Image (tube, rainbow, N blue to C red):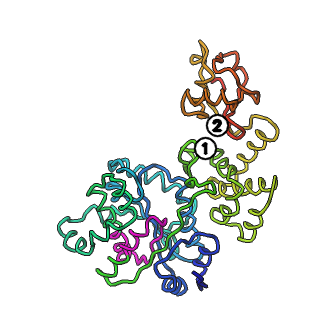
Amino acid sequence: MTYHPKSDFIAIMMERGYLADCTDYQGLDEALSNGVVPAYIGYDATASSLHVGHLLNVMMLRWLQKTGHKPITLMGGGTTKVGDPSFRSDERPLLGPEQIDANIAGMQKVFARYLDYGDGGTDALMLNNAEWLDSLNYLEFLRDIGRHFSVNRMLSFESVKSRLDREQSLSFLEFNYMILQAYDFMELNRRYGCTLQMGGSDQWGNIVNGIDLTRRVIDNEVYGLTSPLLTTSDGKKMGKSQDGAVWLNADMLRPYLFWQFWRNTTDADTGRFLKLYTELPVAECERLGALQGSEINEAKVLLANEVTTLLHGAEAAAAAEATAREVFEKGGVGDDLPTLTISAADVAEGISIVQLIVKSGLAKSGKDAKRLISEGGAKIDDAPLEDAGMMIDAAALSNTIKLSAGKKRHALIKLG
């Protein structure tokens, strides 16, 4: 649709590619133009770190704050005990309260890099839905809230329908999740004046439920805004690398590997990712994204530097770039590469090169490592590695060894 927004926030959402849909463009735009709008995104505490798949929505909260509004990061201390069925093929494992609290503490470290928390009018709030969900009385909840939900309508939501169409089990526990999420929106509106929920487009049904419930129970007008579910130009889900999730906490993924993930962006995605994941002006993002040949590689380095600086700081970004240039351009070993330290006892009788490739994280299994070698994708100190039976002893490790899988993945092996 063609809509010319008055508010800076909606203008940025449209211009940079964050916007998939909105429940009421005009109403939300008016609200954003007339004062501070508190808006939230919910995060279930299923892991101790956010991953790259969350980053798009974190950037939306950052832009919300930069345009004079109030972001709320709602941690699902309560809903994590239940599990969100949205577009999953199985039921989530249930976590205990201690693990949930530990996960929330880990995720808070990332939010603090992107948002300013505090008591001011546009300072971010970190809330936990256990605050109101843990004390719910089940019978009162059924009577006061449950009566507003139509099971027929809930069955029509894509997240539920996709499970049922595949004849996969959907437990009553998970079915309750969408009611709890709707209740979250209403409680945030009642307690904190929150008038906007944002999320990925797979959350549309849950968001609409919350808007309806808030209108019916406390007669307040609230809004929903969704972002597109991102896939890369080759059709893969954004945020998945060949080694699994790209975590945002440095203790779960070293800044060099995070930087490398962005440096490996395909040519076709570079301009789009610059708009979504950096704060460079849109015209500059488009100019960089249109570069051809080897020039686009400098645009990717800039993308990696900008994104890594936001998350890990300028020093980590500079160190990652220096290591990459050392490794790729000069054939060196680089100071910041993933390093596996082997004890003398471990190599007393020798250790196979296949084991080292697996231990260093360059392959997931011995079978993968052997395949890598047989297909000519493995190198040792930049020379082709052809013998899968090679053994490495302490003498061979008197100098640091560099192992490579393809052109872009490297690790150092040294004696401790």
Quadrant in which the N terminus is drawn: bottom right
Residue holding disc 1: 254
In space, the residues marked 2 and 1 are separated at their CA atoms by 8 Å
Q: Read off the magenta span.
A: 182-210
Q: Is residue 218 above or below residue 313?
A: below
**Residue 169 belongs to magenta span:** no
The foreground one among 398 and 57 is 57
Q: Where is residue 3 in the image (x, y as percent from the top left)?
A: 59, 84
**Amino acid type of the residue tagged 2 in the rendering:** Pro
Judge from the rendering whether residue 269 lies leftward or rightward of residue 326; answer left or right. Answer: left
Q: Quadrant of the C terminus?
A: top right
Helix, strand or loop for the magenta stretch, by majority: helix
- Tag shown at residue 338: 2
In the rendered structure, which amino acid carries the disc numbered 1?
Answer: Arg
SS class, disc 2: loop
Q: In which quarter of the image is residue 332?
A: top right
Is residue 184 inside the magenta stretch? yes
Front in this rendered view, residue 304 or 96: 304
Between residue 58 and residue 89, name the one nearer to us: 89
Left or right of 60: which side holds 266? Answer: right
**Is mark 2 in CB contact (under 8 Å) with mark 1?**
yes
Q: Position of residue 74 (x, y in %)?
A: 42, 64
Drawn side of residue 23 relative to residue 357, left or right: left
